[in-house]
Amino acid sequence: MQQAEQLKQDLDYVVGAVRRHDRSAGVPSIYFMWAAIIAVGWALPDFAPQLAAPFWVLFGIGGGLVSIWLAARDTKHSGSVDQAHGRRHGLHWLVTGAAFLVCWLPVMRGAPIETAVGNFMLVAAISYALAGVHLERPLLWTGLLMLAAYVVLTMFAWPYTWTATGLLVAIALAWAGFSSQRSRSPVHPE
Amino acid sequence: MKALDGLDSAFEHRARLAIGVLLARHDEISFARFKQSLSLTDGNLGAQLRKLEDAGYLALRRDFVERKPVTWYRLTEAGRDALDSHLAALQAMIATATG
């Protein structure tokens, strides 16, 4: 009986250590960077539509590359390397990038540009929400916000919907960044 | 009891079992991260890691992060096999005890 109690305590200790280790709420610097990119990039269709495409080509790809670098740097600082987790992140955002490109197909075949922007918002919403479910919980709220914005975009012709959505998403991402920063306990080198 | 045959003395200490389980879930973990996750002192953690290393279950590499030395640990193939056997034996033991 005493042995069983000892075994239970040992397993509780192991479970506690694994749970403590698994707390991952993302990399704050990545959230802050995308908050800035989205705030600017989503305002462009309202104020300077001709700049939107070049902006997203430059900052979409550049932001992705900087995100990879920031994540690798964070991995080293956090003291835990998980290649499978990194591959899952990479694959998720790669598929998202491919889906964004596919959004332009209807426009290339002559459909009005509104078709593409609606698709773009829906893809972004699903991608962020699913990232929130499977990868980093704070992204769930940004995804749901985008989904609500897609509904507004589709159902009503409100002015500055893109700018307002971009700002809301940026605030949600910044909030996620701050909460991620707070929940982290720094790992000091040996 | 047959299940007891599979138990590995290297993983009988709860800290060493936790080290094994954490490394089975992640590729590499640093000394500092272990210290934080397991709430152990430097000396105790170092001793437990050394026991697993001596058994051939852990491999380590030394690296620098912002000019500070960091020691990274990973499970060897032998360590992974031994941990699998140990966990299977534990499961069998619990199943026997609970009927």
Image (cartoon, rainbow, N blue to C red):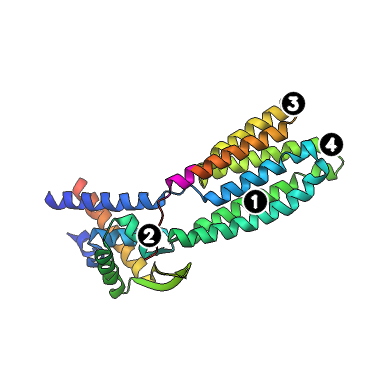
Judging by the rendered image, the residue that carries numbered circle 1 is A95
In the displayed orientation, state which residue is furthest to the right: A110
> How far apart are the alpha carbons under marks 3 and 1?
30 Å
Q: Are marks 2 and 4 in contact (CB under 8 Å)?
A: no
Chain ID at mark 1: A
Chain ID at mark 3: A
Residue at image position (21%, 64%) is: B5
Closest to the camera, between mark 1 and mark 2, is 2
Residue at image position (61%, 49%) is: A33
Judging by the rendered image, the residue that carries numbered circle 3 is A158
Q: Secondary structure at mark 4?
A: loop
- Residue B31 can be seen, yes or no: yes
Chain ID at mark 4: A
> How far apart are the alpha carbons under marks 2 and 4?
53 Å
Label 4 is placed on what type of residue?
Pro
Q: Which mark is residue A112?
A: 4
